[in-house]
Amino acid sequence: MSIESVQARIGEIINRIGQKTAKIDMDFQAVFGETLGSDSAPESAEVSAGTGQAGLLQNNATTTGRYCSKCGMPEVASIYAQYTGAVDTGDGMLEKAAPYMDIIEEASSVYGVPVNLILGVIKAESDFDPKCVSGAGAKGLMQIMPENAAEFGVTDVYDPRQNIFCGVDEIARHLKTYSGDMKLALAAYNTGPGNVAKRNVTSSNSPEYLNIPQSVRDYADRVLRYAGLGQ
């Protein structure tokens, strides 16, 4: 793919997300704002969607000064941070996410999970490598375990659409189970809801949350940072 094609694709993604995610971000803040705390949430849906008066969708966007080692295009992760609420991880996250944004947007719309949270999970799980396989046997972009793939009717765990829809569906269920407690939902996604339940954890603000292994709690914090929702 040429540099021009990649740039055109990114511009298309930015415009589409700017149109589609504003309502999702507003609804998300209304539902989860109390759980996250005002300091953690994006300042406004207008800013996080990238559709405000500051001209966040202009073609002359400020770049980071870094360039993709593969295609040579300038990194525009600062714009990415503004229109999704996600952070600039400094490693070309936007370029990595670009091939999957249509699917991510669709899954976000279907299951009501914000785009930036989905991006944070994929970043933490596989760094956008659709062929990623963990030592525990989790596979694909969202690191789906074989038993979960079977439960959610996934026939090809390496297919990005099936993998993302499965992972987002699971996250949405955890968010519902834990009343919007994202840290606990992410902990359940990482270690399994059974491992959360056996520790009698009902809130990430409770003392029992510390009974969850540190590595799992670190995972939840990392996802939230990638999503621009953590401290």
Image: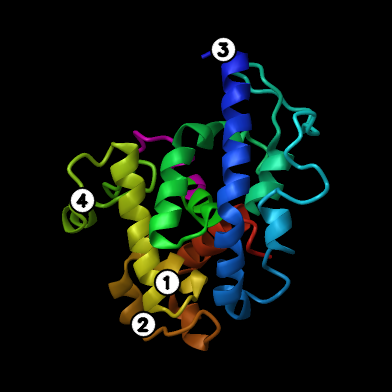
Q: Residue furthest top?
A: 2
Kind of element beneath mark 1: helix
- Residue 93 location, quadrant: top right
Could you tell me which residue is drawn at 43 percent across and 42 percent down? 126
Identify which amino acid the numbered label 1 is placed on: Leu
Identify which amino acid the numbered label 2 is placed on: Arg
Q: Which of marks 1 and 2 is nearer the N terminus?
A: 1
| Residue 127 drawn in magenta | yes
Q: Name the residue under label 1.
A: 175
Could you tell me which residue is drawn at 26 percent across and 52 percent down? 145
Kindly report the distance in space between the C-alpha atoms of the residues bearing marks 4 and 1: 21 Å
- Give, as a single range, the part of the protein colored magenta: 123-132
Q: Which residue lies furthest to the right in this view?
A: 54
Kindly report the distance in space between the C-alpha atoms of the residues bearing marks 4 and 2: 24 Å
Q: Where is residue 38 in the image (x, y as percent from the top left)?
A: 71, 74
Q: Position of residue 123 (x, y in %)?
A: 51, 45
Seen in the picture, residue 9 relative to 90 is either above or below; the reply is above
Q: Name the residue under label 4.
A: 146
Could you tell me which residue is drawn at 48 percent across and 75 percent down? 180
Q: Which of marks 4 and 2 is nearer the N terminus?
A: 4
